[in-house]
Image (tube, grey):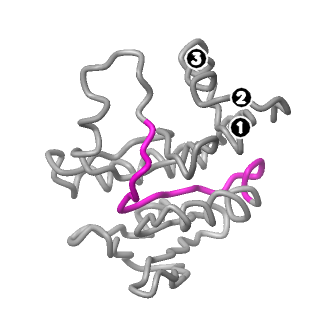
Amino acid sequence: MSVAQRITEAEYERIVLAAPDQQWELIEGRLREKPGKSWDHGRIVTLLGYLLMFQLDHREFLVLYESRVRREVGTIFLPDLMVVPTSYGRDFAGQPGVLAIFSDPLPLVVEVWSASTGDYDVDTKIPEYQRRGDRELWRIHPYERTLTARRHQPDESYAETVYRTGIVAAESLPGVAVDLSELFGD
């Protein structure tokens, strides 16, 4: 659901903090409620988070679910999963009631396809993550059983690779890889 009236980020924060069980994004000043997840969607996000956390040093990185990233003032998305350097949390630590909204590029942002948001993720969110300069973007499709990786290149473009089998390395996180057969439950 989208709300037509434009609001400020301060109003957005008040709404989000007042209704913590709802998932709101802000698109050019307009509220958009993120729909619920299917079992397959939630399973992939949860398992991927576990697989990544197991490989990352928690002193350097955290895996966050549906936390917030800012593209520009007035646009805030909730990726399904993202890897955040712990240093990014310094601005928010010890401040109850302050939303953590990350503006700096992230090493890895993940969206998992769902029937309700699949086109929106590809057409709207992924291009915005690229404009943010996020280093690596994964779009996982649980029914096509694919992981599409878009990786930031030195010339600021993104190279895209589609994986159907095997082990996928997170190039932005050295030493981190995910076995697709484990992720898709083979």
Q: Where are the magenta residues, as a range? A: 101-118
Q: Which residue is painted at 50% across and 66% down in the image? A: 138
Q: Which residue is mark 1?
A: 29
Q: Are marks 1 and 2 in contact (CB under 8 Å)?
A: yes
Q: Which residue is mark 2?
A: 7
Identify which amino acid the numbered label 2 is placed on: Ile
Instruction: Confirm whether residue 1 shows in the render.
Output: no
Quadrant of the drawing holding the N terminus: top right
What is the secondary structure assignment of the residue under circle 1? loop
**Percent coordinates x, y for residue 121 in the rendering:** 68, 57
Identify which amino acid the numbered label 1 is placed on: Gly
Crowding around mark 1 (Cα neighbors within 10 Å: few <14, some 14 to 19, many 20+) is many
Crowding around mark 3 (Cα neighbors within 10 Å: few <14, some 14 to 19, many 20+) is some
Which quadrant would residue 139 be assigned to in this image? bottom right
**Percent coordinates x, y for residue 22 in the rendering:** 63, 24
**Percent coordinates x, y for residue 132 in the rendering:** 50, 61
What is the secondary structure assignment of the residue under circle 3? helix
Q: Using residue 39 as the reference point, say whether residue 67 is left or right of it.
A: left
Q: Which residue is mark 3?
A: 14
